């Protein structure tokens, strides 16, 4: 989910539902369009070219997921290339699969615009607000251990929170706290873009939020807010006595069997990785953000992963492998967030697809699971620049699901500034 810095709370970034950080994502945010020349993907027509015969749409099976035949694969190739060219996205990695239906893994475009190095499926990527799914899982493990309660007030663990005696951990995880999103603060935007290498502490991030009045009473409405996750990260640290990144890697990443998922403490970015391109810069011009310090995203959007790990995580997250059934049920108890989408505890349900999106400067992600078909969809790309008001990951998610699950199309409507 994310929130565009320049428009106070337009949804979008770590992948989220409606708004996220500049690490956020759940909803889209307006942005400029840029990217490499897309002519290589454009169709070439001649005067004598015959009119092509349209490929019939695949017929979904009883579980709603189409067989990934060669014909469907070609449709996916064409749809992804079309989005890549129209939205001028440098590169993208896509994986779609379901038991008994086949597997589609492809990469398109470039990982580095300067060298022309191609995007490949083995690259490490910054995942933005998909980080939220790991932070909330860590919290829910502490719930299962009886160390915290979802209805505990945040003031029990963190001092100085506006309405801290009434905002619960459940409301923070469900984006219903009413707190202001620190990544929508203009001073924060200036501080980050003027020196994207600087580290931020969690308290500094909270200070940007807490200087603003609360937006509404606890649980009154949905508002995607990265501040909520910073607070939950502090709860995990205080209760466990372990730094958040270490706790997540030890208690979430390792038990989930993930091999290339890390919570960085600075700008470190394991090789091989794609370069990332953003216009969320001091000049407004497109810059390479691969080496920016993601500490400002921390519990809301700092993590790094790769395609194999996220394909596995999509199922673990949606099925609750690491949690008790009762706690997972609470996580998946979604409430209306935006049209066609509900948000639970650090997770969304969009037309039956369960997971999260992510976006932060230079990168976008989408990690989804469809329980009926046991299907997984993961999209990773190296820009956060939107197209016609839509998150780049949403463009791909919609194009892909129109083909493989036409009765369950993943889409998030553009959100107005709030």
Image (cartoon, rainbow, N blue to C red):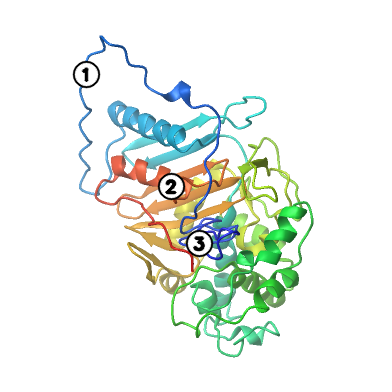
Residue under numbered circle 2: 388
Mark 3 Cα shell of 10 Å, populated few (<14), some (14-19), many (≥20)? many
Task: Give the Cα separation between the discs numbered 1 and 2.
Answer: 29 Å
Q: Nearer the viewer, residue 237 or 4?
A: 4
Task: Give the Cα separation between the discs numbered 1 and 3.
Answer: 42 Å
Numbered circle sitting on residue 332: none
Q: Residue furthest top?
A: 48
Residue under numbered circle 3: 10
Residue 246: percent from the left, percent from the top?
71, 61
Residue 4: percent from the left, percent from the top?
56, 58
Q: Are marks 1 and 2 in contact (CB under 8 Å)?
A: no
x 68%, y 55%: residue? 263
Quarter where residue 144 is shown: bottom right
Q: Which callout, 1 or 2, points to the residue nearer the camera? A: 2
Residue under numbered circle 1: 51
Mark 2 Cα shell of 10 Å, populated few (<14), some (14-19), many (≥20)? some
Can residue 264 be seen in this snapshot? no
Q: Closer to the N terminus: mark 1 or mark 3?
A: 3
Q: Closer to the N terminus: mark 1 or mark 2?
A: 1
Can residue 273 be seen in this snapshot? yes
């Amino acid at each position: 989910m994310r929130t565009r810095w320049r428009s106070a709370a337009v949804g979008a970034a770590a992948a989220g539902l409606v708004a996220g950080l500049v690490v956020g994502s759940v909803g889209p945010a307006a942005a400029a369009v840029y990217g490499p020349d897309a002519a290589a993907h454009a169709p070439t027509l001649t005067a004598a070219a015959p009119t092509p015969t349209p490929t019939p749409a695949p017929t979904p099976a009883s579980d709603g997921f189409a067989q990934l035949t060669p014909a469907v694969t070609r449709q996916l190739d064409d749809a992804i290339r079309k989005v890549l060219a129209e939205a001028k996205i440098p590169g993208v990695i896509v994986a779609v699969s379901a038991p008994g239906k086949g597997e589609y893994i492809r990469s398109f475009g470039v990982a580095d615009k300067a060298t022309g190095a191609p995007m490949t499926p083995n690259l490490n990527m910054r995942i933005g607000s998909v980080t939220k799914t790991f932070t909330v899982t860590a919290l829910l493990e502490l719930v299962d251990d009886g160390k915290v309660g979802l209805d505990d007030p945040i003031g029990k663990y963190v001092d100085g929170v506006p309405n801290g005696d009434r905002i619960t951990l459940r409301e923070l995880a469900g984006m219903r706290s009413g707190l202001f999103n620190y990544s929508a603060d203009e001073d924060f935007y200036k501080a980050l873009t003027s020196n994207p290498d600087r580290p931020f502490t969690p308290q500094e991030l909270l200070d940007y939020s807490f200087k603003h009045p609360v937006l509404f009473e606890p649980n009154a409405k949905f508002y995607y807010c990265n501040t909520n996750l910073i607070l939950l990260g502090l709860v995990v640290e205080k209760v466990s006595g372990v730094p958040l990144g270490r706790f997540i890697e030890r208690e979430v990443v390792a038990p989930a069997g993930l091999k290339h998922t890390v919570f960085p403490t600075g700008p470190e970015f394991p090789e091989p990785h794609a370069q990332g391109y953003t216009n969320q810069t001091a000049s407004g011009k497109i810059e390479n953000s691969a080496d920016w310090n993601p500490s400002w995203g921390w519990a809301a959007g700092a993590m790094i992963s790769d395609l194999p790990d996220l394909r596995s995580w999509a199922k673990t997250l949606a099925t609750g492998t690491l949690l008790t059934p009762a706690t997972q049920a609470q996580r998946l108890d979604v409430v209306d967030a935006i049209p066609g989408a509900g948000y639970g505890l650090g997770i969304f349900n969009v037309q039956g697809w369960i997971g999260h999106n992510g976006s932060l400067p230079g990168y976008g992600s989408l990690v989804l699971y469809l329980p009926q078909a046991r299907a997984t969809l993961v999209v990773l790309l190296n820009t956060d620049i939107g197209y016609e008001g839509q998150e780049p990951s949403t463009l791909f998610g919609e194009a892909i699901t129109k083909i493989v699950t036409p009765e369950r199309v993943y889409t998030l409507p553009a959100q107005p500034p709030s």
